[in-house]
C-alpha cells in the first residue's frame, strides 16, 4: 500500500512539473515574459471585475466571457462581489506602455491586467487566450502563472484584402477580422473597388452597384489566364456582389470591438473600370463599356480604366462618393490607390491636354499629381488623410499624403526622406497571394514574381537599411497584401494567409532584437494545432 501511495504521489508530481515546464507559446512574442510555477484554473467560479461605466472595458470583458463560454461551456461572472477567483481589468496610466501596451500578471487565484487604454486590455486577453486550448468542453481551462509586459513595435500592423476580383461575404470578412485580432493586428485595409468590380453601396450613385458590382465571367476560368477547362452548358455567367451601407457599418463596428481600424480603398484615377462602366461620362472617351473582365476580353486597352482629370464634373462625382465613404468609415484615412495609371487616354484627351496647358503641367505624370492633390483637398475637407500606393509620388507628392511602398522599398524611402509617413508592403516578401514554397507545382495557382516563404516574411524588417536613422519614425509599420485574382474562397484565402500572417504579426509587434525564426516556428506549433481544431485551413510543409 505504501508503495502504491508513493507511486501515485510521484506520478502526480511529475505531471505538475511537466505542466510547469511547458513553454508558453504566444505570437507575437511579448517584449517581456516570465513564467512561474502553478496555474490559474478557469471555471464557473471566476468573475471578471471591471468598471462597468467604461464601454471599452465592458465590451472587452464580454469578448473574453464569450470566448471562454464557446470553448469550455463556462460562463464567467461580471463584477461578482466576494468572488474567490477574479480577472481584474484596470485602466491605469501609471507605468503602462503606450496606447496599446499592457501588463499581465497571472497568479493562482487572480489575473491582473492593466493598460492605459482598452486596446491594451484587449491585447492582454489575446495573450491569455493563446495559452488556453481552442476547445475544452466542460473542463477547466488552465492558464500558466506568468508576468508579461508588452507593447507593439509599430503603430500600423495591417492586412489588405482585395474584394473586387473575388467577392467575400460579410461573414467571411468577420472571420478574417477574428484571425487578425488574435495576432494583435490592427488595420484592415479594404480594397473595395477596382476594374473588375465595385463593392460599396453609394446611395447618390446607385448604378455603381447595380452595374459596377457585376461582370461576365467564364465558367472554370482562372482570372488573368486563358480558360483551359472544357465548358459545358452556359459558358458565361454574371459574377459579383457588394456590401450595403448597413453591412459596412456592422463590419466596422465588429472590427472596432477587436481594436481594428478599417481603412477603405476607393481606386482613382486608374483601376476604375467598374465605376466607369456604371458612369462612362467620367472617362476620357465617355463611351459605354461593360465591367472589365480580362479573362473574357483578353485586352487591357479594350476598356476605359481612368477617370478624366480634365473634366470638372469628375471631381464633383468623386467628392460625393468620398462624402459617403467618410461618413461610413471612422478611420482617419481614406486610401485612393493611385497606382498603375495607363496615361494613354490622357494623352489623347482634349480636356486633359487643355488642363495641362492651362495649369502649366509638363507631362501626364504632372497631371496625375494635379489630380491627386485636388483629391487630397477633398479628403481633407472631410477630416481625413489621403493614403496611396507608391505611384502617387509621380509628378510630385501631395502635401500630407501617406505612402504605401509596394514596388520594393524605393518609394517608401523616398517618401520618408521627404518627411512623409510610410507603410511598407513590398510585394517581395509581403504579397501573400504569391507562392509560399519553392515546390509550388502542386500548389494553388499564384503569380510567380517572387516566392514568399514563411521564413522570408519573418526575416523582413520594415525599416529599410538605406533609410537614415533620423527618418525611421516616419515608418508607421507594415502590412500583408492579398490580391484575389486567383483566390475565390475563404478556404483558399486562409491557406494563402496562414501561417505567413503570423510571421508578419510578430515582425511588426515584437522587439526586433528578440525576433528569432527558429523560436518562432516552435511557438507556431500550438497555433497550427488550434487552426486544425477550428477547421481553419493553412499551409504546411
Image (cartoon, rainbow, N blue to C red):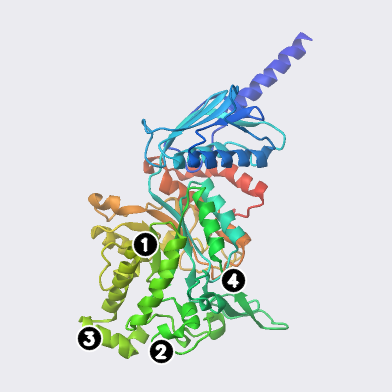
Report how many numbered discs are placed on residues in the image: 4
- Residue sitting nearer the eye, 329 or 304: 329
Q: Nearer the viewer, mark 2 or mark 1?
A: 2
SS label for mark 1? strand
Outermost residue toward the left in this view: 360
For the residues marked 1 and 4, what is the alpha-carbon distance in whole angstroms?
27 Å
Q: Mark 2 = which residue? A: 285
Q: Which of marks 1 and 3 is nearer the N terminus?
A: 3
Q: Which of marks 4 and 2 is nearer the N terminus?
A: 4
Residue at 28% from the left image edge and 51% from the top image edge: 472
For the residues marked 4 and 2, what is the alpha-carbon distance in whole angstroms?
27 Å
SS label for mark 4? loop
Q: Which of marks 2 and 1 is nearer the N terminus?
A: 2
Mark drawn on residue 313: none
Residue 125's x, y, as percent? 53, 38
Q: Mark 4 = which residue? A: 241
Mark drawn on residue 357: 3
Q: Mark 1 = which residue? A: 404
For the residues marked 2 and 3, what is the alpha-carbon distance in whole angstroms?
20 Å
Residue at 59% from the left image edge and 61% from the top image edge: 170
- Residue sitting nearer the eye, 266 or 293: 266
For the residues marked 3 and 4, what is the alpha-carbon distance in whole angstroms?
41 Å
Amino acid at each position: 500500500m505504501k508503495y502504491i501511495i508513493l507511486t501515485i504521489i510521484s506520478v502526480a508530481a511529475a505531471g505538475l512539473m511537466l505542466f510547469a515546464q511547458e513553454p508558453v507559446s504566444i505570437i507575437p512574442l511579448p517584449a517581456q515574459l516570465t513564467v512561474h510555477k502553478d496555474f490559474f484554473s478557469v471555471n464557473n467560479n471566476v468573475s471578471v471585475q471591471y468598471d462597468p461605466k467604461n464601454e471599452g472595458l465592458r465590451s472587452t470583458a464580454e469578448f473574453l466571457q464569450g470566448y471562454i463560454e464557446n470553448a469550455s461551456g463556462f460562463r464567467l461572472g461580471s463584477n461578482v462581489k466576494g468572488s474567490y477567483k477574479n480577472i481584474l481589468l484596470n485602466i491605469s496610466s501609471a507605468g503602462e506602455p503606450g496606447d496599446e501596451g499592457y501588463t499581465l500578471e497571472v497568479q493562482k487565484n487572480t489575473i491582473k491586467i492593466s493598460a492605459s487604454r482598452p486596446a491594451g486590455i484587449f491585447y492582454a486577453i489575446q495573450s491569455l487566450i493563446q495559452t488556453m486550448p481552442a476547445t475544452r468542453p466542460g473542463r477547466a481551462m488552465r492558464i500558466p502563472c506568468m508576468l508579461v509586459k508588452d507593447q507593439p513595435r509599430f503603430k500600423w500592423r495591417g492586412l489588405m484584402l482585395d474584394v473586387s476580383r473575388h467577392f467575400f461575404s460579410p461573414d467571411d470578412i468577420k472571420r478574417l477580422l477574428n484571425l487578425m485580432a488574435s495576432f494583435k493586428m490592427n488595420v484592415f485595409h479594404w480594397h473595395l473597388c477596382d476594374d473588375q468590380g465595385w463593392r460599396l453601396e453609394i446611395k447618390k450613385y446607385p448604378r455603381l452597384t447595380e452595374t459596377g458590382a457585376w461582370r461576365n465571367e467564364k465558367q472554370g476560368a482562372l482570372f488573368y489566364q486563358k480558360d483551359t477547362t472544357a465548358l459545358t452548358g452556359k459558358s458565361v455567367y454574371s459574377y459579383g456582389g457588394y456590401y450595403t451601407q448597413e453591412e459596412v457599418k456592422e463590419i466596422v463596428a465588429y472590427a472596432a470591438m477587436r481594436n481594428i481600424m478599417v481603412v477603405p480603398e476607393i481606386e482613382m484615377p486608374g483601376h476604375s473600370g467598374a465605376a466607369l462602366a456604371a458612369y462612362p461620362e467620367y472617362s476620357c472617351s465617355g463611351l459605354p463599356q461593360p465591367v472589365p473582365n480580362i479573362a473574357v476580353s483578353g485586352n487591357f486597352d479594350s476598356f476605359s480604366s481612368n477617370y478624366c482629370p480634365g473634366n470638372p464634373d469628375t471631381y464633383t462625382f468623386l467628392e460625393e462618393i468620398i462624402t459617403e465613404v467618410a461618413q461610413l468609415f471612422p478611420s482617419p484615412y481614406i486610401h485612393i490607390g493611385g497606382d498603375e495609371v495607363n496615361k494613354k487616354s490622357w494623352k489623347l484627351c482634349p480636356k486633359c491636354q487643355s488642363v495641362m496647358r492651362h495649369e502649366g503641367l509638363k507631362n501626364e505624370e504632372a497631371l496625375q499629381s494635379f489630380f491627386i492633390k485636388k483629391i487630397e483637398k477633398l479628403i481633407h475637407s472631410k477630416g481625413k488623410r489621403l493614403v496611396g500606393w507608391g505611384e502617387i509620388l509621380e509628378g510630385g507628392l501631395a502635401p500630407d499624403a501617406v505612402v504605401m511602398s509596394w514596388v520594393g522599398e524605393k518609394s517608401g524611402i523616398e517618401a520618408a526622406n521627404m518627411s512623409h509617413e510610410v507603410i511598407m508592403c513590398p510585394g517581395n516578401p509581403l504579397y501573400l497571394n504569391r507562392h509560399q514554397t519553392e515546390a509550388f507545382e502542386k500548389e494553388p495557382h499564384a503569380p510567380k514574381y517572387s516566392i514568399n516563404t514563411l521564413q522570408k516574411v519573418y526575416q523582413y524588417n520594415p525599416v529599410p537599411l538605406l533609410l537614415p536613422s533620423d527618418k525611421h519614425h516616419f515608418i508607421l509599420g507594415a502590412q500583408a497584401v492579398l490580391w484575389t485574382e486567383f483566390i475565390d474562397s475563404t478556404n483558399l484565402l486562409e491557406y494563402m494567409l496562414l501561417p505567413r500572417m503570423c510571421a508578419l504579426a510578430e515582425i511588426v509587434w515584437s522587439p526586433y532584437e528578440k525576433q528569432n525564426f527558429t523560436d518562432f516556428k516552435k511557438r507556431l506549433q500550438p497555433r497550427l494545432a488550434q487552426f486544425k481544431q477550428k477547421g481553419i485551413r493553412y499551409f504546411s510543409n
